[in-house]
Every structure is written in C-alpha cells, then in structure tokens.
Amino acid sequence: MTGSFAGQTVDAARRALTAQFKSAAIESADLDARLLTGHALGLDLTGLISAAQRQLTPDESVRLEEFARRRLAGEPVARIVGEREFWGLPLQLSSATLVPRPDTETVVELALELLRADGDLNRPLRIADLGTGSGAILLALLSELPAATGFGTDISELALQTAAANAARAGLLERATFIACDYASGLSGLFDLIVSNPPYIRSADIGGLAVEVRNHDPLAALDGGADGLDAYRALIPQAACRLAPGAALVVEAGEGQSGQIQALMTAAGLTPARAPKADLAGVPRAVAGHKTAR
C-alpha cells in the first residue's frame, strides 16, 4: 500500500518510496525509486539533486503515488516510464513489445564479432532482424555499422510503429525499413546478417515467470510452444534461404536451448559459426550459424 507524499521534499519522498519498495522486497528499490521520482517530476539525476529540498507540488505527489502503486503491483519501471535503454539507445516501449533486456545485448556482441572477423565494419551491409519488437537489436547494430541498411519484421503493426519511432529518435530511420510479416516470409534478396530474439519460453513455464514479465510483456513475444522451440523451427529455415553465402544467423536462446537450436541450424544447412556466446550470468545466450560460402 502506498502512502501520501504530499508536503514532503523531493529527497524525503524519494527516500520514503525507497523504503516502500524495500519493504515489498523489490531488489532494485533505490534505483526504481530514483527513476520514478525523476519521471514524476520531469527531472534527471542532476535535477533531483538540485531540487532535493523543495516540496512536491500536489500534482507531483499524485503522480508519484500512482507510480508507486503500479510498481508495487509488479509493473516494471520501464513500462511506467515508457522506455528502456538498450546498447546506449533510449527505446520507446508499447504493449506489443518486450522490455529489452541486457541479456539480449549478447546477440549484438556476437553479431558484431562475426562481422568484424569477416572484414571492415564500415562496409555496406544488408541486415535483418526477425520479430524486431521495439527495434532494439536492429538499431543497436545500425548504430555500430554506419554503411549498413536494416530491415525489421514483425507480425504486430503496433510493434513496427514503435520500432520506427525508435529509429527516428536515434537518427537511423533513413537506413531502416520495417515490414509486417512472419519472420523472414516477407523479405526478398540476400542478407549479410540476420538476427532474432524470438519467443522461447515453454508454454507450461509462462505462469511461473516473474510478475513483471508474465503480466506486462506480450504473450506472443514470450510463448515458444510446448518445448520453447516453435519459433526457431519456423524462422531458421526461412533465414537460411535469405542468407548470402558466408553470412550468419544469430539468435537469442533460452537457458538449456543452445544445443537444440544448433541442431535446427544444422538441419537447415547452416554450420555452427562458433561456440554459443554466454551472457553475464554464464548462460549460452547467443547462437550463430553460417551459410557455407560457395
């Protein structure tokens, strides 16, 4: 239950909010309280410090109380503030997109490593992100590949609108095209790199996810079917047909899935590019397969 912040100073309100979150066993209580206080007041960290001893206005108090209620009910901070940073890019979210997670940056890292091994990152490249969502992976790559053009696909028009808005905000819209289709089914031509973070949670495991994920991320972006591999069975053969000789497919994997995904890639004619790349927790998170060069 939230308390009133009326009449409190900015600093006192932030501390009170931190205490509420700690009482609710929210691990990132201090950070969440700072972010939500800043969002309610329209202040960055420097602004919060400068305004620490002024009193909240009545409107600010009401906004902060509403944010506190939502966070205590399990809504992620990123959903409340409407954006999340990924690869240094601030990304707008919508109900049709996942909240981008640090684990997914492993896909970007492996993709760049593979491209760097094949040549200059400044060369013209054609890349695709299947199931682009907020555009996180595609825009991260375009930000690192100045001569690349990118294509993001998704079955959700709302997700594509969100991705396009993020591309415009990052100054990358001129090099990004967004297409409504299922994975690679609407793409034509060959690509130097294809990436994807598809749904990979087993259907039976959805109910056991953290409330921040279970109740707030779109089910279609989470549910990978009975064994979590339905999306890979669809997208890997499609991607294999769209890869240029020597090009790579890099996908995100759930825990314990990397070996099965490699087998699906092999069955589609791709050769494992290297061992799966682990995330910071040591989980094999990014899996890559190469199209054999002619």
Image (cartoon, rainbow, N blue to C red):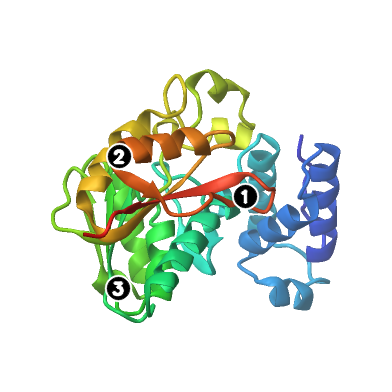
Q: Residues within 10 Å of mark 1 (few under 14, many from 20)?
A: many
Residue that label 3 marks: 148
- Callout 2: helix, strand or loop? helix
Residue that label 2 marks: 235
Q: Where in the figure is residue 226, as x and y percent of width and height?
A: 45, 19
Direction left: furthest residue: 188
> Which of the two labelled residues, at mark 2 and mark 1, occupies the earlier sequence position?
1
Query: Residue at the location (68% across, 59% down)?
Result: 35
Q: CA distance from mark 1 to mark 3?
A: 33 Å
The image shows residue 143, relative to residue 213, as above or below, that is below
| Nearer to me, 103 or 177 | 103
Name the mark nearer the viewer: 2 or 1: 2
Residue type at the position of mark 2: Leu
Asked if disc 2 and disc 3 are in contact, CB closer than 8 Å, the reply is no
Q: CA distance from mark 2 to mark 3?
A: 22 Å
Q: Can residue 245 be seen?
A: yes
Residue type at the position of mark 1: Val
Residue that label 1 marks: 77
